[in-house]
Image: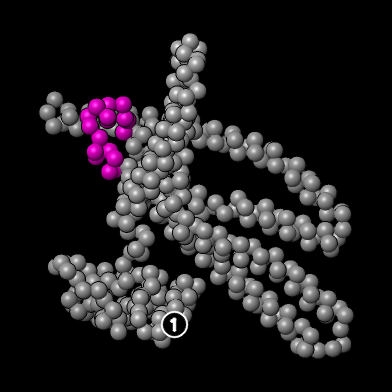
Amino acid sequence: AAAAARPPSEEAGVPNRLPWPEDGIVSADEATRKCNWLCSINDALFYSYMSRILDKGAYLHKERRRKRRQLNDTPSHEKEEMTVDDLYEAPRAMRASHLRDEFHRLRKEQREMVAAKEEDEATKKKDRGRSRAGRRHRHARSRSFSARRKRAKASRTAFMKVLWGLARPTYITAAVYQLIAVLSQCAIPILVRAVLIQIENNPGESFIREGMPYAIGLFVVAILEGVSMERQKYLAFQSGIVLRAAIVNAVYEHILRLTPRGRSGLANGEITNLVAIDSQKLFELTQEGHQVWSCPLAMIIVTVLLLLELGPTVLVGMGSMFLCLPIIQYVVQKMMHIRKKRIELTDRRIQATTAMLQGIKFTKLNHY
């Protein structure tokens, strides 16, 4: 069955890999489609498709240990090892060709929207400025600077929308799983409280009859929390990979098409930072981005539960915690300021190192 599912190779030397299981298989048969739907849910929640690779790796490791104990090393051509064919193909949404086309499509849409908006604003200003010819000449320089700032801001906003368009399919799904994980975390103390109340109210009776539903609920909620949290991490990780790959691809493609005049003011350190550091920061941002809304939501839910259980005395502790927010904000701003300075110093260091290495190469090649 695995061999039959392999896609045919059109070129010689191209590895025949299995398709990515989460991409789905389209089938006209209703029973097969229902089975594929159930299998896709199982794969998405428990990653059962990795069992094939893990089982083969464990089997090979066991065989190596057995042969090492027997001191019987077989010839190299008879050894069975993991190959490229044992891996899966990259998901369709994470392939370089798909990301490149999607990035250019979204970028083109945003440019058209920005151009249409600027054209509308220019038409409105032209209609309003016919009776203000004298003042317009006097403040032309300030308006030109303001227009450049607006264009730069619109360009940054359009670029952020492009990145959001790339990460949206998986990042919104990750937000749903994060919400389920937060609600599950908040439901566990409620169920534990209900179990304790049942034990206190019925000390002489059996716990199985009254407390078994709560115990089953704890088990289900704990599994739901673990699965949701792992799924959220996986989808956020996938979103970060998509953003990083798209940015690196776009930067390299743009630099390769630049003319010598366009590369005149571009330092090597800036390019290296864009590819190595800035893209990595976006990748790290996707891992913790959902904490921006999930942490306040969890705090609000926990505060309400404690308020209902303990009364207004909880507000003292919560108030002191919220009073620490300005201090945390100040520390974060300082860290961001230091990070910006460090990036500038990193640009200079990379530029100096690159110039030094190029000088050494030029000296060696010319036998000076």
- What residue is at 50 percent from the left and 15 percent from the top? 132
Residue 356 position (above or below residue 246): above
**143 sits left or right of 16 in the view:** right
Inspect this view and state whether residue 87 appears.
Answer: yes
Residue 259 position (above or below residue 312): above
**154 sits left or right of 252 in the view:** right
Q: Quadrant of the C terminus?
A: top left
Residue 153 position (above or below residue 26): above
Q: Is 177 in front, or is 363?
A: 177
Q: Is 362 in front, or is 29?
A: 29
Kind of residue sitting beneath label 1? Lys
Q: Residue furthest left?
A: 367
Q: Is 41 in front, or is 266?
A: 41
Q: Secondary structure at mark 1?
A: helix
Q: Quadrant of the N terminus?
A: bottom left
Q: Position of residue 108 (x, y in %)?
A: 35, 44
Q: Position of residue 9 (x, y in %)?
A: 19, 71
Segment tinted magenta in the rendering: 252-268
Does the stretch in magenta take in 305? no
Does the stretch in magenta take in 256? yes
Q: Which residue is mark 1?
A: 34
Q: Position of residue 114 (x, y in %)?
A: 42, 38
